[in-house]
Amino acid sequence: MNYVGRFAPSPSGPLHAGSLVAALASWLDARAHDGRWLLRMEDVDTPRTVAGAADTIMAQLTALGLRWDGDVMWQSRRNVAYQAACDSLAARGLVYGCGCTRREIADSALRGPAAAPGADGERPYPGTCRHGLPPGRQARAWRVRIPEGIEHFEDRWLGPQEQDVARAVGDFALRRADGLWAYQLAVVVDDAEQGVTDVVRGADLLSSTARQRVLGRLLELPPVRYLHVPLILDPASGLKLSKQNGAPALSLDAPLDALQGAWRALGFDPIAADSPDSFLSVATARWARRFP
Ligand code: GLU
């Protein structure tokens, strides 16, 4: 079987208990399928990148025994590839410049029929500039024309999923008003470049998956399988554990305890092990039985 998985952290801070769950699940799925597990630093959003965070993440993964294969891919070095993907869509008339400000998008969404924000609080783009920039306006962002229709896919953990991307999200940005390439474009282009067959990541990204599939198809890239793992919530606030919510960095003092905690968070029974490597080999076998 030709399995390629990946872990794609944003180096805006060190790994915490929540990101470890995604890292462990994707590592286990790759090893359970005799696959490769690649590491990609998603530093495309340069203002959010924190100096030293990528090194810390790599040191944390190493201490946990989560070894990656091959060279690390850095999104900050991939401008040429993102531009080429955007150009290929533009050559087919699938990209347009958008002069709307955030404020205008929020206001027109309130007036339009699709007023309700999506699950992640995002409002769909109402299509204001789809047929050309209003007179006197300059393009700020570059958007992709999303075809009508419902996107269906099977999630290996959550089962059948669907989203009407055109209605729920609208024509989304490939290049943002601040000039940065959008995460959605970068992730699709990079997964294809790295030959990724299986994306295993946290359920906070489930709402991005349908649009990534649509974009991948427009770019004529091979489809990818998905498995989204449950998020860990902070017991005190009930919010997702995340850097933004102040989740503490994962300590390197007790890697085995950290692995056991992430494993329990994935809903598995504890494993008797005395080192990260012995834990990981038992966990791989159990994962393989659950997700063949
Ligand atoms: N860089 C994203 C994050 O850290 C993950 C992207 C992905 O796995 O597709 O949330």
Image (spheres, grey):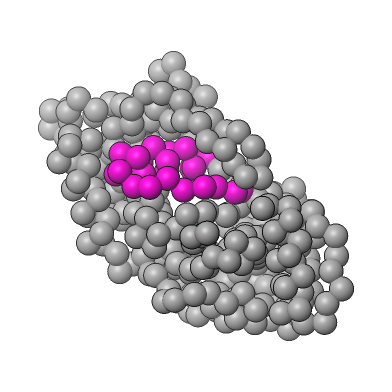
Determine the residue positioned at 52% across, 36% down.
Answer: 153
From this view, report whether residue 128 is shown above or below residue 184: above
From this view, report whether residue 8 is shown above or below residue 220: below
Q: Which residues are magenta?
A: 207-228
Q: Position of residue 8 (x, y in %)?
A: 49, 62
Q: Position of residue 227 (x, y in %)?
A: 60, 49
Q: Position of residue 196 (x, y in %)?
A: 45, 58
Residue 24 visible in the shown view: yes
Query: Left of 280 or right of it: where is 95?
Result: left
User: Is 234 colored magenta in this rendering?
Assistant: no
Q: Please state the total of marks drawn on the protein image.
A: 0
Residue 190 visible in the shown view: no
Query: Left of 64 or right of it: where is 87?
Result: left
Determine the residue positioned at 39% across, 37% down.
Answer: 214
Determine the residue positioned at 69% across, 59% down.
Answer: 288
From this view, report whether residue 223 is shown above or below residue 280: above
Q: Nearer the viewer, residue 83 or 70?
A: 70
Q: Position of residue 107 (x, y in %)?
A: 39, 27
Determine the residue positioned at 56% across, 43% down.
Answer: 206
Q: Which quadrant would residue 83 be assigned to in this image?
A: bottom left
User: Is 227 colored magenta in this rendering?
Assistant: yes
